[in-house]
Image (cartoon, rainbow, N blue to C red):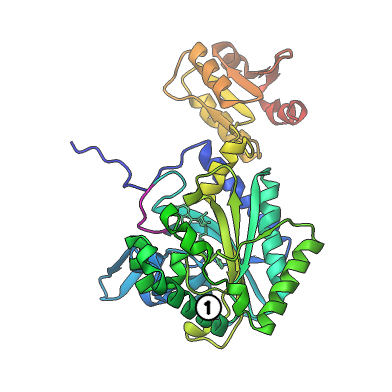
Amino acid sequence: MAEFKTSPGMRDILDPESGRWRRFVARFEQVVESAGYRQVIPPLLEDIGVFQRVGEATDVVTKEMYDFVDKGERHVALRPEQTASVCRAFVQHRPTVPWKAWYAGPNFRYEKPQRGRFRQFDQVGIEVLGATDPFLDVEVIALGWSFLESLGLREVSLQLNSLGEPADRERFVAALAEYFERHSSSLTSESRATLAKNPLRVLDSKRPEDAAIIADAPRIASFHSVEAAAHFSTVRDGLERLGIPFAVNDRLVRGLDYYRHTTFEYVGGTLDSAQNALGGGGRYDGLVADLGGPATAGVGFAIGLDRTLLACDDEAVFAPVAASVQVFVIDTTGGAEALALTHEIRRAGYSADRAFEARSMKSQMKAADRSGAEIALIVGPDELGSGTVVVRPMRGGDQVTVPRSDILPTLQKVLS
Ligand code: HAM
């Protein structure tokens, strides 16, 4: 018989890690709901055209998409990210602006799997559509920062850049192309290939042979229009006012093409540099229009769950918590009494578990220990005969025998 395992870059998340994932999303929900963001749940699969708008010159779109033609001859793709889906949803439903949305869920990219890089990975994120105010950029950045702080992470730094208006960016890209062409003989062959497709991406090269040429390349700040420079300056002032430390990194271009003005990344201090962005985002004021909607500003971020939890492991924070039940029912009379008692207790709102397969008292006690229960309820032949139950505290204290009919009031008394 064939033995199946998960595909490369895909993982099963088991308890207690699965509980940690739920707590991560619940914590995120708490942070963003209390700031007025409301959840949107886009589908996992969309017309491929939705994602092509994310950037025809990016690996995410050209190489990494899980796409196929469905049984209705539609060319669809599993979402590689959710910003494009949220913008598509905005165009389709036209909610009132500013629309403040949050989301959580898996995305798919056919990447080379390694630590912190998977083919199915989860993100939590927010998007705001319909406001150009630079203070909104600050709110968005601050919420991601507060969330990461609330996990207990201390070794995260914030990198900030502005790509300016589309025209600024175009002039910058033209200048970069001209500069890199002039020095192409000193670039690695990989960077020369990148240059032919997208000069901006050459700045991403981490190859040491490219470092000197990249260091002297033109800088985006010299191409900022007056408006773009003012927007960026207000964002920086806002962050300073909130006491959020940041470093301007004018080489931060990000892996998706839709950004304008502000871009940022939360960088984890404990991870390898190729996978050290815990999250990132920025403004994408042209994306809604690219998807057929009215000209609408947009700003947001996504934080990778898989990678951020690795950073939590490294910093020994936000640890998995072993789940437990309040009550464990032990029945050595065949199991029917445990069936009824457990059902009754659960219906009264207590968490309760039991053993199956009519195991010995000893093995049921072990199972009770493992369950983390505060109280064991024990029914043996004597108790069954006299219509009673033994109530035994699992962490010290005297056990008592109570009438079966008094079990709920007794639990109410003994459980904290
Ligand atoms: P992104 O930078 O492509 O941006 O992804 C955001 C985060 O998702 C990354 O920092 C990382 O933690 C996680 N991530 C991405 N790819 C992988 C992978 N293969 N394995 C594990 N984790 C991964 C976006 O997705 C944009 N939609 C962010 C955004 C929202 N911009 C504006 N609004």
Q: Could you tell me residue 229's position as x and y percent?
A: 68, 78
Q: Let me know if residue 409 appears in the view.
A: yes
Q: In this view, does 207 lie above or below 160?
A: above
Provide the secondary structure element on which disc 1 rests.
Answer: helix
Please indicate whether residue 127 sits to the left or right of residue 105 in the image. right
Residue 31 sits in quarter: bottom right
Q: Name the residue under label 1.
A: 172
Please indicate whether residue 332 sits to the left or right of residue 45 in the image. right
Q: Which amino acid does label 1 sit on?
A: Phe
Please indicate whether residue 356 sits to the left or right of residue 282 in the image. left
Q: Could you tell me residue 411's position as x and y percent?
A: 71, 28
Q: Looking at the rendering, in which quadrant would you find the N terminus?
A: top left
Viewer-side residue, 408 vs 270: 270
Is the magenta region chiefly helix, strand or loop?
A: loop
Q: Let me know if residue 198 appears in the view.
A: no
The stretch of residues the image draws in magenta is: 108-113
Q: Which residue is drawn at the image coordinates 67% and 80% (left, top)?
A: 132
**Badge 1: how crowded within 10 Å, few (<14), some, or many (20+)?**
many
